[in-house]
Amino acid sequence: MCARRGDVANSLADATGLRVKAPDGIAASGTLDLVVETVARRAGTVNLGTVLPVYLDAKVGPVLRRVEATAPGERVHAPFTVRVAPGATPQAYSFCPYTVQDLGITAARVHVTVRPAPDTGTRTDTNASLAAAGMERTTV
């Protein structure tokens, strides 16, 4: 249990388990591929998804996938892609993958670190930027 943010994983009794395969870091402007996996309790539809924190400048696609299990005990999985915006703040985040079958839900918190975007080789001339804005740099 995390003293600051609560449990790392929660599950209702008899809900499916949850396994997540994902890298632990990504650069801003990068793509993070993850797989959410579970073992079905019975044959039928299993919903797998992931939720990003609202303060992370990124999009996940798709948000939800429905997978059909053909038998109890079958391992099912679904891939998801997280696209991190170039302006995302470099810091630690956590996203929440989940699985639902027959109203039994399991959710987890997975940590990921966003690193600064790679240097593109372009530099901004501060003095030129200030002059264009009608300002001047002074040294004290």
Image (cartoon, helix red, strand yellow):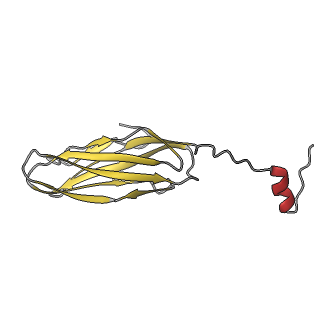
Residue 18 lies in quadrant? top left
Q: Name the residue: 42% across, 43% down.
A: 5
Would you place residue 128 above or below residue 112 in this image? Answer: below
Q: Is residue 89 left or right of residue 67?
A: right
Position of the N terminus, as image quadrant, is top left
Position of the C terminus, as image quadrant, is top right
* Residue located farthest toward the front when viewing the structure as drawn: 121
Counting from the top left corner in percent of width and height, residue 137 is at 89, 51
Q: Is residue 46 left or right of residue 60?
A: left
Counting from the top left corner in percent of width and height, residue 28 is at 54, 47
Residue 2 lies in quadrant? top left
The number of numbered badges drawn on the structure is 0
Counting from the top left corner in percent of width and height, residue 105 is at 22, 52
Nearest the viewer among 33 and 71 is: 33
Q: Is residue 85 left or right of residue 17?
A: right
Counting from the top left corner in percent of width and height, residue 82 is at 42, 52
Q: Name the residue: 34% across, 59% down.
A: 63
Q: Name the residue: 53% across, 50% down.
A: 29
